[in-house]
Amino acid sequence: LPELLRQRAKPHRKPKPRPGASTAVEDDLLLLLDTAALAAQPRWVEPRSFFRASQTGESCVRALTLSVAGHSPPVEPRVLRIFKTGNAIEEAIIESMRRAKVVLDIQVAIEFVEPPIKGSADVVIEHGGEPQVVEIKSINSRRWDRLPEPHGYVLAGRSALRLTGHENYVCQTNTYMAGLKLGRGCVLFEHKDTQHQRVYWLEFDQELHQEILERHHSAALHLYTKTVAPTPSERDPRGKDQHCRWCNHRQLCLVMPADVAIPWETARRIDTEEISR
């Protein structure tokens, strides 16, 4: 491998040889595949002029503003493969819906002007004599075991999913319902290993939608000034805050000043200096 790619591969844990495999050939092949996947991921991408509907469940304004600024830390090749598997599961479910003749449209775009939010709903189906949004999610055993019992129609803000670590999916679906002016929808989960499925039916919740808009209005003030927001008072990236623990932006957040807004260019410089140490 070129030296540059070998350097990019340093954080990668060398794959364990499989039983009966040729160690040298097997490890070299896996390293080649994983290093290529890492090299294809820029740490910063072009800034956006809008927030993603898929992130409307993000409660941290700093994380929202880092995302639109273009901060995009590379993820492990294994995680990329998980994402691709999830995409394949989504396509298979939509194909089943087509065979059931309930699909009205797929990848249906929505847009809010102020605050600027854009996204695409997975699929809109006809159910119960009306069009409804369906958001499809494939999850692992750990997250599946945390799912509550499936429920019929409830206001999105009152769904038990919000209490079990699936807040973002509820907010995302509610945002799609708002953008498409639909009153009902659901989140459909599939277990990645067993292919068991569960459905949670939601009614559009105006109060939840207003909370989402207010949070994004705050973030938009920083988007317009091209700054990263200060760390919210309720977040603690240095402590045991579980939200921060799983945040893609945590490492950069830790080395940036917490109590002031940071220009995008400054955030990039701080990040560059940090990874070069």
Image: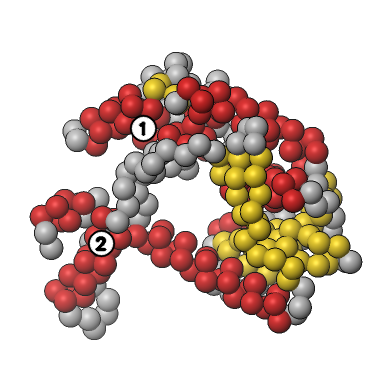
Residue drawn where x is 70% and y is 75% of the image: 97
Q: Is residue 132 visible?
A: yes
**Real-space Cα separation, disc 2 to disc 1, in angstroms:** 24 Å
Q: Position of residue 256 (x, y in %)?
A: 36, 24
Query: Nearer the viewer's eye, disc 2 or disc 1?
Result: 2
Q: Is residue 211 left or right of residue 48?
A: right
Residue at 57% across / 61% down in the picture?
139
Depicted 167 relative to depicted 233: above or below: below
Total count of labels: 2
Q: Is residue 199 left or right of residue 225?
A: right
Kindly identify the amino acid type of the residue bearing the numbered disc 2.
Answer: Ala
State which quarter of the image contains the N terminus: bottom left
Within the image, what quadrant is residue 158 found in?
top right
In terms of depth relative to the viewer, which is nearer, 257 or 14?
A: 257
Quarter of the image that includes the C terminus: top left
- The percent position of residue 46, horizontal first and vertical second, equals 39, 41
Going by the picture, which residue comes out furthest to the left? 3
- Position of residue 275 in the picture relative to residue 247 (left or right): left
In the displayed orientation, state which residue is furthest to the top: 260
On the image, numbered disc 1 is attached to which residue? 252
Q: Is residue 99 above or below residue 2?
A: below
Give the crowd class for mark 2: few <14, some 14-19, many >=20 residues within 10 Å: some
At horizontal 73% and vertical 71% (from top left) the residue drawn is 103
- Pointer 2 residue: 36
Q: What secondary structure is marked by label 1?
A: helix
Q: Residue at x 68, y 35 (%)?
A: 212
In the depicted structure, whether residue 224 falls above or below residue 16 = above
The amino acid on which the numbered mark 1 sits, given as a three-letter code, is Leu
- Sequence-first disc among 2 and 1: 2
CB within 8 Å, label 2 to label 1: no
